[in-house]
């Protein structure tokens, strides 16, 4: 088992006919992910074809769920419409929603967060690379890839990875894979100030998952999600955890690319996060080049 | 996006908040005329306030020695003299850095006698995932200072983003601040308007500091927004063209403005090692590792998770305009992108821009072998690196060598 999504999870792609959505739909199909349907309002009835596979396109998520039995959806919808797409997926009963879209206004996400409270839908993102549960095939094919992460860098195994970053996560995953260490599931929770699942939400799932034996947490400046995760880890987590926090050299008050990566009012510094993690017994990598090795030293 | 005090006050006034009567001025003559009018209307005292995007103006000093970016005056002549001293002058405050900011506008406004200084702000509470209104009896000082010294003096009122601000929440805060009797109603209205401004403008911060109890008409207590800092959320500007028009490019670094045209995230820093990276997290991590190996990053530059050749070329052009740069580190994790395409982009950009600085390239990911071959066959002497650590060590060494030789080398350095 892995967390959130399994190789047989049926996945929809909202925005499958846009160039970005289509490109990653094709890559997910090549990876072996069960892409069972696409959603583009106005294009219902058309078919998305790739590698001899035919993926039906629907006008609404509700219709797509009824016809395919999908339980997960990846959203590649432009920012002004993305919050609506998330709510539509939740309304249709989708269990795991991955929103790749960058640039969704905070006010939209505040409403989404309130609307999702108490529902079973779990949101990953927005502004994230998505989630990968590696498969058993060549280059980890046969797994579930929702989002934009490169599939081949993964390897099936027992390390859970959770991160706010995209390429920095690939870096860490690739370090693991090249050392022959596989992953149970890799979750990119995104770089926005109002995310769906937090580091802590994902870590709780990793702790419960018998297939995950160790955890890598990648954080960055801004907010206090890493500190909250650290406090919980200190009390409840008996699995080895290694971490890296990006942004030790970032100047305060400046937004470092990600909307949520900002030190404001002296809060959200890398130093404070590193201290909280160390205090919780987490091994913090001194540089991004040593993320995998820092974890391996614990095993 | 930050906006000026005079712009923020206008947004607050439009929503019924009490801001001092005043006008923004581009010239000293205009400042005099505005001052004459306000004094004729009965004002006893005026403030002349330099308009720059930085805090600490009152305690700041101009580069020519003139003290204070905020001055209190009682005559139109004084107002004119202050405006003349400030306009075109460069103000240095604890937030501007030593270079300071050029003052292009001053705000001339009524400055009644202040009886109490309070604090009020609306911002996003990231831990709770909701907006929060903050208030304190300790106005007129940095709230971070209050948070460190007397955190119990900061009141917070979380807001349900769907329900919006409720009137009782305003009364609760008013009473906690000691604003009772005839001030209770106006204070509750103030908080309502403050939240409404934050929500309607999609601000990331509206901070009134100080919010003052002043001598109002007839000497009775009245509330007044004496200073305000406001920043708007960049991601929401697409639906507020009127607010987007408040951008003041004079307050932004020219290189950062140039970078934004190519959808590059560029932030200039003080070091001499330029970084060009794909992805924000990896870009921060690259700066960190450069520092770890003893170097100083010259910038943060994220070309996006999937950079194009045009973006890479534009990125090189921007980096090369920074005269402090002595060496460049390119760190690309080509996940989906083909590393060979990126390598061709780097070669094209180096040729097009005539780069003469040491260039360390670390490519990883998809088709990396072909990418490295393209770099090696280009005839350019790119220093190739195998890992982030290797890349950081090599670029720090290259920057040191370039600093030691005193001048930029005549050609791209020969490397490994």
Image: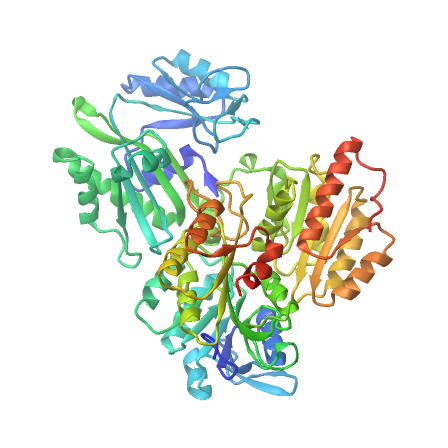
Q: Which of the 4 image quarters holds residue A129? A: bottom right
Taking the spot 42% from the left edge, 68% from the top edge, the residue there is A123
Q: Relative to A122, is B88 above or below?
A: above
Q: Which of the 4 image quarters holds residue B177? A: top left
Q: Relative to B68, is A91 above or below?
A: below
Taking the spot 40% from the left edge, 52% from the top edge, the residue there is A224
The reply to whether residue B279 is in sight is no
Residue A72 position, x and y percent, is 46, 77
Taking the spot 37% from the left edge, 50% from the top edge, the residue there is B124
Locate residue A154 relative to residue A75 in the image: left or right.
right
Q: Which of the 4 image quarters holds residue A231? A: bottom left
Name the one closer to the observer, B215 or B56: B56
Locate residue B396 relative to residue B25 in the image: left or right.
right
Residue A207 position, x and y percent, is 42, 69
Residue B65 position, x and y percent, is 52, 15
Locate residue A123 relative to residue B163 in the image: left or right.
right
Q: Relative to A167, is B398 above or below?
A: above
The reply to whether residue A13 is in sight is yes
Residue A116 position, x and y percent, is 34, 68
Name the one closer to the observer, A160 or B241: A160
Name the one closer to the observer, B108 or B294: B294
């Amino acid at each position: 088992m892995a967390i959130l999504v399994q190789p047989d999870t049926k996945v929809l792609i909202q925005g499958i006919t846009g160039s970005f959505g289509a490109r990653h739909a094709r890559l997910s199909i090549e990876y072996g992910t069960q892409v069972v349907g696409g959603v583009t309002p106005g294009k219902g009835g058309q078919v998305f074809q790739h590698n001899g596979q035919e993926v039906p396109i629907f006008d609404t998520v509700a219709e797509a769920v009824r016809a395919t039995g999908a339980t997960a959806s990846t959203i590649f919808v432009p920012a002004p419409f993305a919050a609506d797409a998330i709510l539509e997926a939740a309304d249709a009963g989708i269990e795991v929603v991955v929103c790749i879209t960058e640039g969704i206004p905070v006010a939209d996400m505040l409403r989404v967060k309130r609307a999702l409270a108490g529902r079973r839908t779990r949101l990953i993102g927005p502004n994230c690379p998505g989630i990968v549960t590696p498969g058993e095939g060549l280059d980890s094919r046969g797994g579930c890839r929702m989002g934009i992460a490169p599939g081949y860098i993964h390897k099936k195994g027992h390390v859970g990875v959770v991160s706010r970053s995209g390429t920095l996560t690939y870096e860490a995953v690739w370090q693991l894979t090249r050392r022959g260490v596989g992953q149970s599931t890799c979750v990119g929770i995104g770089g926005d100030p109002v995310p769906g699942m937090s580091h802590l939400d994902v870590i709780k799932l990793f702790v419960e998952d018998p297939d995950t034996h160790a955890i890598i947490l990648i954080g960055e400046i801004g907010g206090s999600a890493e500190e909250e995760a650290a406090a919980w880890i200190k009390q409840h987590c008996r699995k080895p955890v290694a971490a890296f926090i990006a942004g030790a050299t970032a100047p305060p008050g400046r937004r470092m690319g990600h909307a949520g990566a900002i030190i404001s009012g002296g809060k959200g510094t890398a130093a404070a996060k590193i201290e909280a993690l160390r205090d919780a017994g987490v091994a913090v990598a001194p540089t991004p080049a040593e993320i995998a090795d820092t974890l391996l030293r614990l095993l | 996006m930050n906006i000026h005090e005079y712009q923020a006050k206008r947004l607050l006034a439009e929503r019924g908040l009490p801001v001092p009567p005043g006008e923004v001025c581009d010239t000293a003559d205009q400042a005099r005329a505005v001052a004459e009018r306000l004094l004729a209307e009965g004002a006893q005292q005026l403030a002349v306030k330099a308009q720059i995007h930085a805090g600490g103006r009152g305690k700041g000093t101009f580069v020519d020695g003139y003290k204070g970016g905020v001055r209190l005056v009682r005559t139109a002549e004084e107002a004119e003299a202050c405006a003349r001293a400030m306009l075109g002058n460069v103000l240095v405050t604890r937030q501007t850095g030593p270079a300071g900011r050029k003052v292009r506008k001053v705000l001339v406004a009524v400055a009644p006698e202040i009886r109490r200084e309070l604090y009020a702000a609306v911002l996003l509470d990231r831990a709770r995932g909701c907006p929060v209104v903050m208030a304190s009896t300790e106005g007129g000082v940095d709230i971070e200072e209050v948070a460190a010294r007397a955190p119990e003096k900061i009141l917070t009122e979380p807001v349900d983003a769907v329900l919006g601000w409720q009137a009782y929440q305003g009364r609760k805060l008013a009473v906690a601040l000691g604003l009772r009797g005839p001030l209770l109603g106006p204070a509750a209205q103030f908080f309502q308007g403050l939240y409404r401004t934050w929500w309607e403008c999609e601000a990331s911060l509206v901070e009134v500091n100080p919010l003052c109890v002043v001598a109002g008409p007839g000497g009775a207590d009245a509330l007044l927004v004496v200073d305000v800092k406001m920043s708007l959320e960049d991601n929401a500007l697409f639906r507020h063209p009127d607010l987007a028009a408040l951008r003041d490019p004079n307050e932004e670094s020219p290189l950062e403005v140039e970078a934004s045209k190519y959808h590059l995230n560029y932030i200039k820093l003080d070091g001499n090692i330029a970084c060009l990276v794909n992805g924000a997290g990896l870009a921060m991590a690259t700066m960190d590792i450069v520092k770890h190996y003893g170097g100083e990053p010259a910038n943060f530059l994220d070309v996006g998770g999937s950079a194009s050749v045009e973006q890479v070329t534009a990125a090189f052009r921007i980096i090369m305009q920074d005269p402090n740069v002595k060496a460049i580190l390119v760190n690309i994790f080509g996940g989906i992108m083909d590393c060979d395409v990126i390598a061709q982009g780097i070669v094209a950009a180096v040729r097009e821009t005539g780069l003469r600085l040491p260039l360390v390239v670390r490519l990883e990911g998809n088709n990396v072998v072909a990418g490295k071959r393209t770099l090696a066959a280009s005839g350019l002497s790119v220093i190739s690196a195998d890992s982030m650590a290797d890349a950081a060590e090599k670029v720090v060494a290259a920057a040191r060598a370039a600093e030691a030789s005193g001048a930029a080398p005549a050609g791209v350095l020969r490397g490994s």
